[in-house]
């Protein structure tokens, strides 16, 4: 009789353990901010890690010291608009380059020529460590429009790193 109680007790404990593990794995996990941006989430929803692992991301895209983020973004879209896709690709943040090869970038952009773009006013985060620039873009074919948000990190020496771009279809069109 004691053996059965002990066996049932062990089975009960085992079931509780398995249930705890299963329930722990079913919780919703929120995206984790890139280090140093924990308090910027409300200001900057684009500062989240992506599915690209850090091992696959190359060296950061550092802007020349005399170049402001809005100048960098303007030059990128001018290159894109005139079809200099190879040079435009070099302006992309490292994490975006890790998501798309040069060939894939060139191929897709050739199929999506832009007719116009507008560089938005740069917005700094409260902490002054990042600058965001929104760019509405209109495509030549199909009347499609999208908006890209560029994220730049300000370094201690005052220069900038292009951190990431996020693109969404513009619903206002």
Image (cartoon, rainbow, N blue to C red):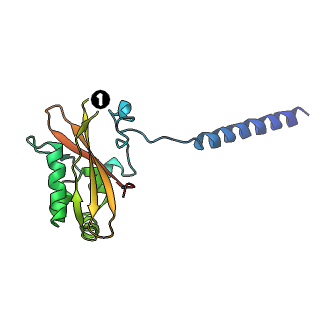
Left/right placement of residue 128 relative to residue 159 reads right
Question: Which of the pair 27/43 is nearer the observer?
Answer: 43
Question: Which of the pair 47/97 is nearer the observer?
Answer: 47
- Picture residue at 28% right of the left edge, 61% below the top: 138
Spot the residue most to the front. 173
- Does 131 sit above or below residue 54? above
- Picture residue at 34% right of the left edge, 38% below the top: 44
Spot the residue most to the right. 1
* Quadrant in the picture for the C terminus: bottom left
Quadrant for residue 91, please give it.
bottom left
Quadrant for residue 15, please give it.
top right
- Picture residue at 69% right of the left edge, 41% below the top: 19
Residue 57, can we see it? no
SS for dot 1 = loop
Question: Which of the pair 54/138 is nearer the observer?
Answer: 138
- Picture residue at 30% right of the left edge, 60% below the top: 100
- Does 26 sit above or below residue 88? above
Residue 122 on image: x %, y %: 22, 40
- Residue under label 1, please give it: 126
């Amino acid at each position: 009789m004691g053996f059965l109680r002990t066996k049932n007790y062990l089975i009960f404990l085992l079931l509780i353990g398995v249930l705890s593990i299963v329930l722990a794995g079913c919780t919703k996990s929120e995206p984790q901010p890139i280090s140093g941006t924990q308090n910027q989430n409300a200001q900057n929803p684009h500062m989240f890690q992506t599915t690209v692992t850090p091992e696959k991301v190359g060296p950061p895209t550092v802007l020349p010291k005399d170049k402001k983020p809005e100048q960098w973004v303007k030059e990128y879209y001018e290159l894109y608009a005139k079809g200099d896709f190879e040079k435009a690709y070099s302006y992309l943040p490292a994490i975006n380059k890790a998501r798309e090869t040069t060939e894939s970038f060139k191929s897709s952009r050739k199929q999506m020529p832009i007719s116009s773009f507008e560089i938005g006013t740069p917005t700094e985060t409260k902490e002054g460590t990042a600058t965001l620039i929104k760019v509405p873009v209109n495509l030549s074919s199909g009347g499609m429009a999208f908006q890209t948000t560029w994220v730049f990190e300000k370094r201690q020496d005052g220069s900038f790193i292009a951190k990431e771009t996020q693109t969404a279809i513009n619903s206002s069109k």
